[in-house]
Amino acid sequence: MKRPLGLLFLALLTLAGALPAGAAAKLRVIATIPDLKALTEAVGGDLVEVDSLARSNQNPHDLEVRPSLMVKLRRADALVVNGLELDQWAEAVIRGANNARVVPGSPGYIDASRGIPVLDVPTVRVDRSMGDVHPLGNPHYTVDPGLAPIVTQTLLEGLARLAPEQRPALERQRQAFLARLEPALARWQTTLAPLQAARFVVYHNDFGYFFRRFGLRQLGTIEERPGIPPSPAHLARLVRDMKDAGARVVIVVEPWSDHKLAARLAEEAGARVAVVNARLGAASGSEAYLASVEANVTALAQAAR
Amino acid sequence: MRAWRIAAIVTVLAGFPATAAAQDAEALRREIEQLRQQMERSQREYQKSLETLTERLQRLESRPQPPAPTAVTPPPATPPTVAAPAAPATAPPGLADLARPRQPFTLYGERRQGQLLFDIGVAADLVGNVVQRNVEKAQAGTFAGRENRFFPREVELALFGQIDPYARGEVRIEAAEEFEDGERSLEVNLAEAYLTLLTLPFSTQAKLGFMRNRFGLLNERHLHDGPQVDRPNVLVKFLGDEGLRESGAELTWVPPLPFYMQALVGVFNGDNDEAFGRGSLKAPLVTGRLRSFFELGDAHALQLGVSAATGETPDRRRSTLAGLDAKFKFTPEGWRHSLLTVGGEWLYSNRTVEVFDATGAGADRKRKRTGWYAYAEVQPWQRWLGGVRYDWTQYPVDPGDEWAVEPYIAFSPSEFLRFRLAYKHTERSHRVTGPDDRGSGRILDELLFQATFFLGAHSTHGF
C-alpha cells in the first residue's frame, strides 16, 4: 500500500518539475467574468493571456464553484475580480487553487471596482426581505462602456504592478483602446437616442449603468426581488404596467434568463424581447469588449424599432 | 305655412344656445388638455430634476474615501468623453506599498464606514420526525432519544474572514438539542475554529485548528448543508453522530496538472469517539485524501475522491478507515442549477478489537466491515427538488447490518430558506431495544422534516 502511494507522489513531483513553469513571458490572468476578460485583453494585448472563470452563458451571481475553475487559477499570475459582492464565489475558488499570487491582499489580486462611482448604493437599512440585495451597490458596471476608462486604468495599475517594465506598453494599448472606444460611444449614443421614448423591462437589475449612460428608461424587473423568482401577482402587475406604458416596451434578457417566461410576457403585453450579452466571450482579443457592447446596442435597437 | 315659419324660428332659437354650449365645451376640453399637457411637462421636469439630484447624491455617497477626481462620471446628460484617461478614485497601491507589511487598519481602509472586518452568519437547522411508538420506546430512530419531536438540531453562528493578507480564519459556534445519558438538553459548543494559511509556497495551503475533516464527500459538510435531512447511516455508524471533527492540521497541495487534483495529508489528536479516540499526538490520527475532477463537456461534471484515516482507539488498538467517493452533476446549458445530481460513498473499516472467550481471556481480533450509500436527485425547477437515497452498512464492531431507503422533496423559496420532507424506511438485521429492554427498533418507518434558514453571510461551498 505504501509503495504505490509513494510512486504516485514521486510521479506527480516529476510531472510538476517537467511542466514549463515560466515558459511563456506572458502574464497569465484570470478574470471572474467575460466582460473583465475582454477589458483585460484590451489593456494587456499580447502581453497577457486571459481566461474567464464564468462562461458567457452563466449567471455571474451564483456560479457553481467547480474544481475546474481552480485548475484555471492554479497557475495564474493575477486574478481580476468584479467586486461589489457580485463574484463572492471567487473566494472559494481562491481557497481551492492553492495559489499564493492571487489571494486577497497580494499584488496579483485586482479588484476592478475600485474608483467606480457606484450606483444604487442603499441609503436605508437593507435586509433580505428585499431579496438578495447588493449592499455595496449595483455591481454591474462593466456593461456601461462609459466606465471602461476607469476599469482599464485599474487593470493597467494592477498589471503594471506585476510587470513594471511593461507599463509603457500597457499604457499605449490602453490609449489605443480608448481611442477606439470614443467614436464607438458617440455612435452608440446616436443609435440609442431614438430609444429614449421606449421602456425597458429587465430580468434582473443589471443594466442600470447602461440605461443611465444612454438615457434609457427602465419600466420594471421580471424578478420580483433580486434573486427571487417572480410570483404570478407580480407578473400580472408587470404585464399591466407594460400595457399601460403607452410606448414600445422591450424585455431585456441575458443568456441565463428564463427566455420562455420573457417570451410569454412579451406576447401578453405586446412587447418585444432583446437578448443581450449573448456575444460575451464569443470574441477574443482587444476588440472583444467593443464587439460585445456593439452587439448589445444592436439587439436593443432592433427590438425597439 | 305660417306655422312652419314659426316652428323654424323656434328651432333656430332653441338650437343657438346648444351650439354655443357645444363650443364652450370644446374650449373647455382644449383648456383641460392644455392643463394636462402642462402637468405632464411639469411632472417630467420634476422627475428629471429628482433623478439628477438622486444621481448626484449617490455619486457623493459612493465616492471612496479619501475622494479623488475621476474623469468619467456616472451617466451624463450629454455624450460622455473618454479622451482623458481617468485615474481610479483611490489609486491601487504602488510597489513600495505592497512590499510594506500590511496592518489591520490598512485593510479596514478597503471597507466602507460601519463595516466589520469579517463576515457574520447564522445557519439554523430545525428538524422533526414522526416514528412508530415501539421505535420511540427503543430510542432507536434516526434522531435517537428525540423521536416524535421537532427540535433545533444545529443553530450555528459563523464568523469568518481574512485575518491578514496571509491567512483566513473561521469560527463556528453551535447550539443544539442533544440527547445524552437519557437526558435531553440544549447545549452550546464550539463547532469549528481554524485558520488557513493561504500564501505558502509550492502551491500548498495549511489549515490548523479544530475542523471538520476533509474525508469523503459529506463529512466536511455541516448538517444544514447536507443533501438530505439526515446523514447516511453508514457515516453515522462508522464516524459517529458528529462525523470526523478533529483538532490538528491539514496540508493540501494542488500539483500543476492539466486537470484538478488535490492531495491532502492531516495529523490530528484522534478524538472521534466512534472510530478512533486515543486523543494524543503521540499516536495521532493521520488522514489523507486525493480528490480529482473532470468536466465532460460544459454540462457534465464528475468528481472522484479517495480518502484514508488511521489512528488508535482509546484502548490503543489500530483503527483504519478507507473510502471512495464520486459525485456527478448534469447542468443543461444556461441553467442556474443542476438538473441531475448523483453521488455516493463507499467506506471500509478495519478495526482491532479485544474479544473475550468463555474463560474470560482476551485476544485481539480484526473487524473488517464495509458500507455504502448512493443518492440521485432531480431539480427541474429552481425552487423544487426531489431525490432518493439508498444506504447499506455493516456495523463497525458488532455483527449485523442495516439498509435504508429515503425518498425526499425540497422546496426553497429563496437560497436562504429551504424546507425538506422525507420518508425513511430502515430495516435492521436484529432487534434494537431501549432502556429496560423496551420497544423495538428493527423496522423503522419515519417521516422526517427540516426547515433551514440563513441569516447574513454564508460561506460559498464547493462542488
Image (cartoon, rainbow, N blue to C red):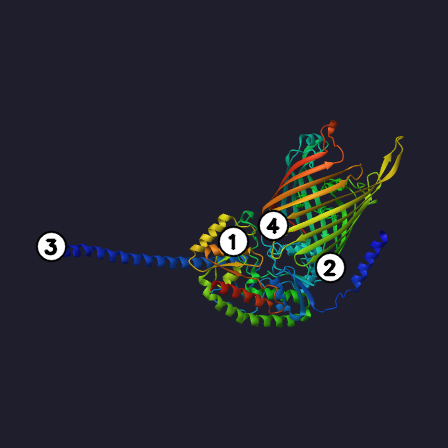
Name the side, left or right, on which B375 lies relative to A129.
right
Secondary structure, mark 2, is: loop
Distance (Cα) linking label 2 and label 1:
39 Å
Asked if badges 2 and 4 are on one and the same chain, I answer yes
Viewer-proximal residue among B265 and A295:
A295
Asked if badges 2 and 3 are on one and the same chain, I answer yes
Residue at mark 3: B3
> What amino acid is found at the position of numbered circle 3 in the picture?
Ala
Name the side, left or right, on which B30 lies relative to A124.
left
Residue at mark 4: B380
Sequence-first tag of 3 and 4: 3
Residue B433 drawn at (x, y percent): 74, 30
Comparing marks 2 and 4, which lies closer to the viewer? Answer: 4
Distance (Cα) linking label 3 and label 4:
87 Å
Residue A113 drawn at (x, y percent): 59, 60
Chain where mark 3 sits: B
> What amino acid is found at the position of numbered circle 2 in the picture?
Phe
Distance (Cα) linking label 2 and label 4:
30 Å
Sequence-first tag of 2 and 4: 2
Proximity of marks 4 and 1: CB atoms separated by less than 8 Å: no
Q: Where is B294 relative to A182, above or below? A: above
Sequence-first tag of 2 and 3: 3
Chain where mark 2 sits: B
Residue at mark 1: A222
> What amino acid is found at the position of numbered circle 1 in the picture?
Ile
